Image: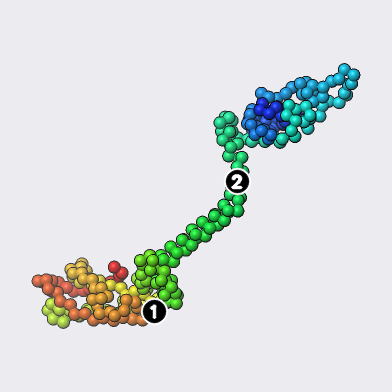
Amino acid sequence: MSMITRCPGCQTLFKVVPDQLRISEGWVRCGHCSQIFDATPHLLPLEQLSAILDPVDDHEQHDEQPHLSEPNPDVHANPEPQANLNLVAESDPSPESSTISFLRDTDNGSFWRRPIQRAALVFVSLALLLGLSVQIVLHERDTIAAFQPGLSSWLVALCGPFNCTLAPLRRIESIVIDSASFNKIRADAYRLNFTVKNVAQVALAIPAIELALTDTLDQPLVRRVFLPSELGVKSDALAAGSEWSASLALAVKAEGMAERVVGYRLLTFYP
């Protein structure tokens, strides 16, 4: 069943449905003057509505009841055409929360529908995407250069403004010690021979070598790290599938240490 309410601001009559009022807790917005009000206190009784919409003439009787679905604009205090009624439902029945919702809904997202706003959003999105792409390329520059050597010059130019450099790819799991030997030359002198092999499909950085001399209990007595520059390596990269051999003469200077040395351990790593 429909009911009629009157806007307290412009006195315009509107048809409302009880279900709508229950959902919106009675709060409505006048579509004519945009005033927000509680429709419940302004509901008109059927008798009063009949007197307003269809006044009885002494010489003429109407057999039909007044039609409530469309208010008569001629009897309004404001003769302008009837405006639509907006109902907004809120989970919080307080007038304050309803008012905030109405104010938020009035914009209806029109600001972001403007062409200039959409163009700005597209531009910002492309700029962010470009920045993210540059960061990824800079972070993975060594991997890209290893698998795509033709892009090395382009990557060097990109690294210029960011003060970064290209370096051979580091994958220590693909560097293996193919062979090694540790022989005593004299009482306190030894010779270390070893061969390192790159089993990867791309060139890798040459690793550092750690030598540990051990005793009878396999406990380390002396440790020494040899950097590629100390081993006479002329290149900083080991080609895919290639080998690198070195021979070192070592002396144990500590008194009584040479007699305790019975074994060794060799390890490759990237410092």
The residue tagged 2 is 109
Q: Residue at x 63, y 31 (%)?
A: 36
Q: Nearer the viewer, residue 115 or 62?
A: 115
Measuring from the top left, give residue 188's x and y in whole percent.
13, 77
Q: Quadrant of residue 75?
A: top right
- Of all residues, the one furthest to the right in this rendering is 59
Identify the disc placed on residue 240: 1
Cα separation between marks 2 and 1:
59 Å
Mark 2 or mark 1, earlier in chain: 2
Q: Give, as a three-letter code, the residue at label 1.
A: Ala
Which residue is found at the position 12% from the left and 73% from the top?
253
**Depth check, front residue: 266 or 54:** 54
- The percent position of residue 159, horizontal first and vertical second, equals 39, 68
Q: Secondary structure at mark 2?
A: loop
Secondary element at image label 1 = loop
State the residue at coordinates (82%, 22%). Answer: 55
